[in-house]
Amino acid sequence: MTCLLVALWLSSRLAIPASQQSSGDRHPVTGNSVRNTIDLRLVTYSQWEHELTSMRGRVVVVDLWATWCAPCVARFPAMITMSKRWAPKGVHFVTLSLDDKNEPGSFEHVVEFLRGHDARTPNFMMNEVLPDAFDKLNINAVPAVFIYDRSGNLRDRLTGDNPNHQFTEDDVEAALKTLVVRRGVE
């Protein structure tokens, strides 16, 4: 009986009603221990813009990705490692998943992916119809990385839009070095 109650409780923690998902409220999903807590928040584009505004005062790196994107999945661990290395220098890393929110189980799938990579950065998932999300973000494909300065200005926009020139982690590092060193933080 106790196992059944625990299983019901855990399933209620993972099952997030659609009415709550569109609200933009935080939905922490907790694993077996406190160390496995991963936070994923659904946001509309206007909520996303508000989130970016609230991060002014810091250098912000936004990793736009999706679990269905092989290059995104391949480079995600490097982005998490990079976030840990740059955090002491005042750089704030954020992930924005462009997985299809209407796909059954997609929210839980993204949470499991984030948990598997110990992604303790602020994590968001776009709560928009995918073509609209891509249009509003002005991207043609993922992965993409946007880097904002402390004033909230977009300083670097690294995308895979040009198939003949794909950005790398070295490009992200170079952009950060230019921005952070120029500001005298490093």
Image (tube, rainbow, N blue to C red):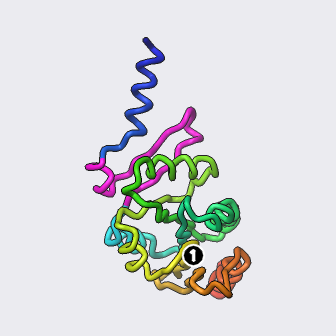
Percent position of residue 145, x then y: 57, 75
**Residue at horizontal 69%, vertical 81%?**
171
| Mark 1 nearby-residue class (10 Å; few <14, some 14–19, many ≥20) | many
- Magenta-colored span: 18-42
- Looking at the image, how many numbered discs can be counted on the residues? 1
Can the viewer see residue 186 in this picture? no
The answer to which of 70 and 30 lies nearer the viewer is 70
Q: Quadrant of residue 59?
A: bottom right
Image-based side of 37 in relation to 87, left or right: left
The answer to which of 102 and 12 lies nearer the viewer is 102
Percent position of residue 178, x then y: 67, 86
Quadrant, the C terminus: bottom right
123 part of magenta stretch: no
Q: Residue furthest right?
A: 170
**Residue at horizontal 61%, vertical 66%?**
72
**Residue at horizontal 67%, vertical 87%?**
164
Percent position of residue 172, x then y: 66, 78
Q: Quadrant of residue 7?
A: top left
Can the viewer see residue 108 in this picture? yes
Quadrant, the N terminus: top left
Image-based side of 136 in relation to 18, left or right: right
Q: Is residue 181 above or below residue 60?
A: below
Residue type for callout 1: Val
Identify the residue position indicated by label 1 in the image: 145
